Image: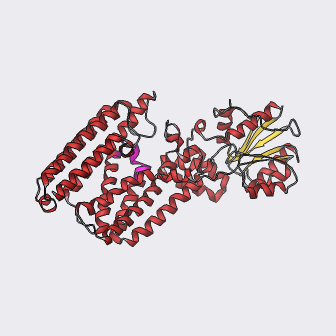
Amino acid sequence: MSKTGHPQQDHSAPKAPVPVLAVDLDGTLLKSDMLHETFWNAASKDWSAALRAVRQLKSGKAALKRELAARSNVDVAKLPYNAEVLDYIAAWRKSGGQVALVTATDQSLADQIATHLGVFDAVFGSDGDRNLKGANKAAFLVETYGEAGFAYAGDHEADLDVWPHAARAVTVNASEALRGKVARLGVEVDHIGAPERDLKPYVKALRPHQWLKNILVFIPLLLAHQLDAISLIRALTAFVAFSLVASSVYVLNDLLDLNADRAHARKCKRPFAAGTVPIGQGTAMAGGLLGVGAVLSVALGATFLFVMVCYYAMTTAYSLYFKRRAVIDVSVLAGLYTLRIVAGGVAVGVGLSMWLLAFSVFFFFALAAVKRQAELVDNIKSGKLQPEGRGYRNDDAEVISQMALGTGYVSILVLALYMNSPDVALLYSNPPALWGICLILLFWISRIVLLTHRGEMHDDPIVFAVRDRISRLCGMMVVGFAVLGAVM
């Protein structure tokens, strides 16, 4: 078996044309890039320190890599390694050849990776002064092994400086254009893999299922019974703007959470953690989504744009700091849910009652607490002593459960008090029918907390509600009671 758990395959590695196979790391052995890995890892601990490290670029890229390597603690055992390259290395070693890791990544990280994999006879990385890439790598390999004294496995245009000096070129997931350039070099060539053309990982990185939360922007419009075409268009624009900005934040959050996600049974399959979407492209995605969302927000007016700026600032602060602080994290999440309702009211020009805002804060605090409770229960079941990247301990699960129940029940109490207010008599012809909503929510909140306690809850209670048949039935009954209250 390979180090990644995949069965070994008998690749057509040559018997002994050259004694050494030099293997690149970023994009070749690793389905990621250690420069981006170390930057986002450092940023997840102290974003200001990560930005200060970028100043080292004035001393060269190798100096930046050394600084980021010192400020980060990437778990090399969980990195997404390329199983096909590991199999090729195994076949080369089996034929009697040696293998060297030759990478532009800092030497300290290269040593950690080599120690973990245990398949390299030598390890060479950047040293803080020389960036071992392109022409520098070519000169180093010729100096160390001689002209045509090595085979070289790489994946990037920069490797075109190296392959002409190698006895054999090995491309990894290279495009047809790059393969054509290598073919014209006049050296023997092996090709491993092909570039991915599947868009599904990119769509998955946006977390479109999370856009369900943004339906909250329609709540003010529906509760005010303001269903004219212009209001609907403005609400829909607000929904799209929120979805794009939210996806930008989800991408940012995934980049900051790489270590924690890779240690999680399900989150390790997220595109950036699994290496199915390059981290560099994720950085560009986060900026692009934010830009388009900002343009749509401007179209809805200055006040809506201000709300979106607040939302982005809060979510960014959550990703960088608050999610690692107990209780504050769920408070911020409840605020972010409520901010969606505020944005909906601003977009369509509907005033928001204190009843709605109070219900929202308590109800979504309960859901955020359920989310944390689910993580703790999952952590306990997996035998881990401490949650990764959170401010809780395993024995906090019972307290979090009580917080979820308490705030959930308070939200229902707020709703019950609202039903006796003069506002309801103005909007609904049959207010007593609305009491059915209270009963349904009382059942639903009690049930999801119970299921979470049993370890049967998804990471996100909103996603669980969409997939759960009983939750969907409860949702339809809530809508039914609301309609009865309005038309009977």
For the point 47% across and 66% down, the residue is: 292
Task: Look at the image and give the residue range highlighted in magenta.
Answer: 316-329
Magenta span: chief secondary structure = helix
Q: Nearer the viewer, residue 485 or 461?
A: 485
User: Position of 214 compared to 92: left or right?
Assistant: left
**Spot occupied by residue 5 in the image (x, y as percentages of width and height):** 63, 32
Q: Which of 31 and 387 is in front in this view?
A: 31
User: Position of 225 compared to 319: left or right?
Assistant: left
Q: The N terminus lies in which quarter of the figure?
A: top right
**Residue 210 visible from this viewpoint:** yes
User: Position of 247 compared to 130: left or right?
Assistant: left
**Spot occupied by residue 447 in the image (x, y as percentages of width and height):** 28, 36
**Residue 326 visible from this viewpoint:** no
Q: In this view, does 275 lie above or below 425?
A: above
For the point 52% across and 63% down, the residue is: 288
Q: In this view, does 176 lie above or below 407?
A: below
For the point 32% across and 60% down, the residue is: 217
**Spot occupied by residue 59 in the image (x, y as percentages of width and height):** 65, 57
Give the colour scheme of this rendering.
Answer: secondary structure
Q: Is residue 410 above or below residue 232?
A: above
**Spot occupied by residue 173 in the image (x, y as percentages of width and height):** 70, 49
Q: Is residue 321 magenta?
A: yes
Q: The C terminus lies in which quarter of the figure?
A: bottom left
Q: How many labels does the image show?
A: 0
Q: Quadrant of residue 469?
A: top left
User: Position of 49 compared to 302: left or right?
Assistant: right
